[in-house]
Image: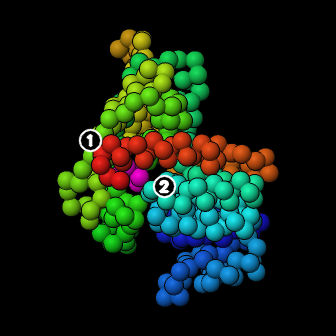
Amino acid sequence: MKIIFFGLGSIGLRHARLIKNNFDHELYAYRSSKKSEKNSLGIKEIFELNEIDRIKPDVAFITNPTNKHVEYATYCARKGINLFIEKPLSNDKQGIPELLKAIKEKNIVTYTAYCLRFHPAIIWLKKYLKENKPLHINVNASSYLHDWRENVDPLKHFSAFKDQGGGIILELSHEIDYLYYLFGDIKKLSVNSEKISDVTIDAEDFVDILLQFKNNVFANVHINFLSRLWRREIIIDFKDRTIISDIINHTITIIKDKKRKTLDFEMQLDDMFLEQLEYFFNHLQKGKPMNNITESLKVFDILMQVKNEANLL
């Protein structure tokens, strides 16, 4: 296949590197400026959108800043190009109806990339929850934004700017996605979120969310990127046990009758992304993957509710 990338930042380069090393596809990258530094993977670059008509790509990877996702996804959808859209879908609802119309008219495959659905601890929980009803969930995700990306000025990156789709709510929207994936639709939510540090220019750096799912399971969610404590864990209390899913250390710990049992998933970070790519490419033929435009809009709507509750829209 022919694949074109819109955006070769850290996540775009990761996807491109994994495709180049593991699949037999022809890669291109659209660059918005000829002054941009040449990509490190030797991917063919184009600088004019009309060159896409010459290339005729099968798939577009939308991996540019969040506030540009819908614009370029719509452009490609109108040309019948299948879409792999890096999370989140967008930073606001502008242009969404036009994107939906183009996707429907051209009947293309779409996927919004939430890679944690392919983390072995999340996969384990998904299976476990089919037969075990939780009482309460506590999610904690903290990190330090300025340590996220090497050789990048964090205060010039879009993560630091609210109008470019930065801020903790969208940047760490994985938590909202996997909670929806694991526990379903949300009945009620309340939010507290602010910018209280200097890790961003004007975007929020923490969010606390109280959730009630339609199955009457409750959750407390705390997410920030102002902390030197790196953690990403889901604590789920059941009637007779507590389960801790540690996303960073790739473990599941089951606590029952004062005894602990730990499952250790041996994995490299690339493994999760590679499984996601394999899933997407397989569904180009099968059609309608999970997190297609219909499902990803449900997650996006929750994110917009969170931002609205926090007075960030």
Residue nearest the observer in this picture, 273 or 96: 96
| Magenta span of residues | 168-172
Question: Please, what is the three-letter code of the amino acid marked with disc 2?
Answer: Lys
Residue 74 lies left or right of residue 309; in this view the side is right
Q: For the residue carrying disc 1, how many other residues have a C-alpha within 10 Å: few (<14), some (14-19), or many (20+)?
A: some
Residue 192's label in the rendered image is 1
Kindly identify the residue that appears in the image at 44 percent across and 57 percent down. Answer: 91
Q: Is 84 in the magenta?
A: no
Whichever of callouts 1 and 2 sits on the residue coming sooner in the sequence is 2
Rendered position, 25 above or below 299:
below
- Position of residue 308 measured from the top left corner of the image (x, y, whole percent): 35, 46
Task: Report the residue at 30% width, 39% height from top.
Answer: 191
Name the spot of residue 270 as percent of width and height, x first. Answer: 56, 54
Question: In the drawing, does residue 120 fall left or right of residue 168?
Answer: right
Q: Which residue is painted at 62% across and 49% down in the image?
A: 293
Circle number at residue 93: 2
Q: Is residue 137 visible?
A: no
143 to 184, vertically: above or below: below
Question: What colouring method underlies this structural image?
Answer: rainbow
Q: Main secondary structure of the magenta part?
A: helix
In the rendered structure, which amino acid carries the disc numbered 1?
A: Asn
Single out the mark in the foreground, 1 or 2: 2
User: Is label 2 in a helix, a strand or a loop?
Assistant: loop
The image shows residue 130 at horizontal and vertical percentages of 58, 22
Element at label 1: strand
In this orientation, which residue lies closer to the viewer: 162 or 126?
Answer: 162
Q: Is residue 111 visible?
A: yes
